[in-house]
Each structure stands twice: as structure tokens, then as C-alpha cells.
Image (cartoon, rainbow, N blue to C red):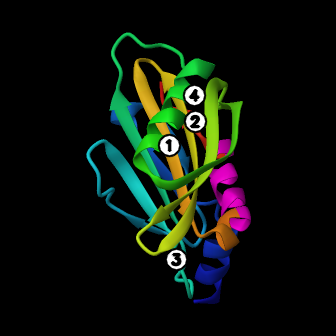
Amino acid sequence: MRWLLVLLLLAPGLAFEAPDVQLAFTNPAGWEQRAAPKEGGLVLFAAPKAPAVRSTLEVAVTEMGQVEELRRQDALGVVRHLAGKLENFDLLGSKETKVAGVKAQRITYKARSGKSILQTTQVFLVRSGRLYLFTLTTSPEQHQAHSRVLNKVLESVRWLS
């Protein structure tokens, strides 16, 4: 029995693979995998239970047709859309980045959801006519620690073809 426990502890993180959308990455360690609740959602991970808000990391994929790359103005359009839809929207940051060699946009913001203020980081990119969206939603207090979890997932992304 001990050898099984040691094997589990030494084994690399479990891989999430979605061959139909050419995406694979390492699951966030200790987070519970669930079915994504929204249309276009691929998978949802929930952080270990916390006394306040339970953080989530959702991955969604949408067919975009002929669009091959996101531009800075696309990210600004997303920000304008969110500002018009979310209560108490406060943009905390926006920057260009890369995910598995593909140009991506990363935005972080706070907004009210019911009685709570939530902090969200979204990383989105287009590859082979698909929009890939990684969304981390946390309480502001948990955001820094759980951003490291998001970063590890993004660093592990690989394309299946």
C-alpha cells in the first residue's frame, strides 16, 4: 500500500486532454474537476473548499471561423463589454502574453456578483480558428495564490496537432 501512495505522490500531474479541440494541459493540483456549466465550456476546476468564495478555473473553447489571431483592440473590446455588463467593474490590468507559443491577451478585473466582490483573470487566444478562454474567478484575498495555479496550467498547455 505504501508503494502506491509514493507512486501517486511522485507521478506528474494528471493531464486534461481534449483532442477534438487540440488542447491538453496539466490539471490544477488538488482542484476538483467538474463539467463546465456554460455553453462552449470545456471543463471547470474548483479549488479546495475555502471559508469564503470557492475559486474556479474554467476553460472554454469557441469556434471562430476565419479569425487567426487576437489583436490588442480585441482585448479592449472585451474590457468595454465587461464594463457595460458587470456591476462595479474595475479593470486591474491588461497585457499581451503567450500561451504555448501563441499570442494571448490577459485581463484582470474586479466586479460585484450578488453580495460579493470577485476578482477574475481571463486569458484568451485564437489558434486554428478557435477561441480558447481560461477564466480564474476568486475572492480578492485568494487571487494572488490562485493566479499561480492559473499560471502553472497555462505553462503546461500543449497543442495536440
Looking at the image, which residue sits at the far left?
39
Query: N-terminal of the two: label 4 or label 3?
Result: 3
* Magenta span dominant secondary structure: helix
**Quadrant for the N terminus in the image:** bottom right
Alpha carbon distance from label 4 to label 1:
10 Å
**Helix, strand or loop at disc 4?**
helix
The three-letter code of the residue at mark 3 reads: Val
Q: Nearer the viewer, mark 4 or mark 3?
A: 4
* Separation of residues labelled 2 and 1 (CA atoms): 32 Å
Query: What residue is disc 4 on?
Result: 76
| Disc 3: which residue | 53
Q: Which residue is mark 1?
A: 83
Q: Is residue 27 visible?
A: no
Residue 75 sits in which quadrant? top right
- Mark 3 Cα-neighbour bin, 10 Å: few <14, some 14–19, many ≥20: some
Amino acid at the residue labelled 2: Arg
Q: Which mark is residue 158?
A: 2
The numbered disc on residue 159 is none
1 and 3 marks in contact (CB < 8 Å): no
85 sits left or right of 147 in the view: left
